[in-house]
Amino acid sequence: MLYIILAILIFGVLIFVHELGHFLTAKLFGVRVNEFSMCMGPAIWQKTVGETTYSLRCIPIGGYRAMEGEDESSQDPRAFTSKPAWQRAIILVAGAAMNFLVGLLILLILYAPSQAFVTSQIVDFMDGCTLEGEQGLQVGDEILSIDGENIYVNGDLTMLLRRGKDSFYDVVVRRDGQRVELKDFKMEPQTFVVDGVEQQMYGLYFGTVENSPWQTVKYAWNSALNFGRIVRLGLVDLVTGAMGLKDMSSPVGIVALISETGNAAESTSEGLLNVLYIGAFLAVNLAFMNLLPIPALDGGRVVAVILTGIIELILRRKINPKYEGYVHAVGMILLLGLSAVLIFKDVFMLLQ
């Protein structure tokens, strides 16, 4: 139950800071904000302060800020559509930026106590490792990329190798200060005996770097970039069919995953750290997903700002915001439909 409550709190915080980003930048640029709401559905609490009504609603999903003229025509000079395009774009991106910063902050907190971080620099090979050689990897090599994908943190190496369709990769390393490319280099796991147990491994020993404030920031930043890359690769897999609906999760499925991860830990403290790590991933995930150019999402709205700006420049007249609102409404209906399907799937899986 502890981890379920914590998961719900994480979602609440992520939604709050996302909408807070929009709210604060809107206020900064003088946009009238009619309502700032947590959750959806009928209001169970409301309070008006100045020109803004603050609400708490009964369905614990999502939240919103209602800016004057956001999806409808308004003559108010402080309406969202009355502001320059660059200000509207900043307001729309601010929510995702806040989520990314929250994810980065969590990672900084998690990594700060670490004594050292594992790097991608090879310091030795296991006996019998076939990757070592003049035409292969050498001690001192720092692996920079696999098939064009950067190595942000050491764990990227295994993840990228597992994504390969065969055992041949284009590997880039830094050797004696120079970039060296190993084209179609064969890398596949071998059987090694570790503490009397046979394991499938690549046979590489990696170095470490002592932690410092700079290393903490660097490692947290690289981890956040890696989270973003995982989102991108996941979307590519969905488009190509490598992943399907069964691999997607709703908030119900994510809460179940967080609870399972926390309960599987050996101690409560370890469980909390694992849950916070998932929270950081969710924060960065939410940031990148919201910037996708899909109607109803912030990225779709930014695209709309750009397109309407171009059209208005050509036609030399304003376009009624209600038309853009119709497009976003359709997008919202489709997203809610997908969410309903995923929730049904996850609930069904939990009941099995």
Image (cartoon, grey):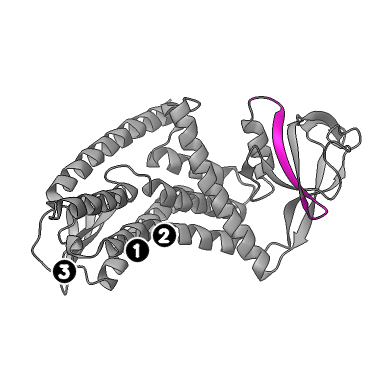
Residue furthest out toward the right: 127
Give the residue type that dot 2 points to.
Ala
Q: Which residues are magenta?
A: 165-178
Residue at 59% across, 59% down:
220
Left or right of 189: which side holds 194?
right
Residue at 65% across, 37% down:
147
Q: Is residue 58 visible?
A: no
Along the viewing direction, whichever of 5 and 218 lies nearer the viewer: 218
Left or right of 291: which side holds 84?
left
Residue 44 against residue 163 in the figure, above or below: below
- The Cα atoms of the two marked residues, 1 and 3, are separated by 18 Å
Residue 257 against residue 320 in the figure, above or below: above
- The Cα atoms of the two marked residues, 2 and 3, are separated by 24 Å
Left or right of 104: which side holds 343?
left
In which quadrant will I find the C terminus?
top left
In magenta segment, residue 169: yes
The circle on residue 180 is: none
Residue furthest out toward the left: 75
Question: Which of the two labelled residues, at mark 1 and mark 3, occupies the earlier sequence position?
Answer: 1
Front disc: 2 or 3: 3
Residue 104 against residue 291 in the figure, above or below: below
Residue at 38% across, 27% down:
348
Task: Give the residue number, with chain letter if any, for mark 3.
Answer: 78
Task: Kindly indicate whether the residue at mark 2 contacts the one at mark 1 (C-beta within 8 angstroms).
Answer: yes
The circle on residue 97 is: 2
Give the residue type that dot 1 points to.
Gly
Q: List x then y, in percent, for residue 347.
A: 37, 32
Q: Is residue 43 visible?
A: yes
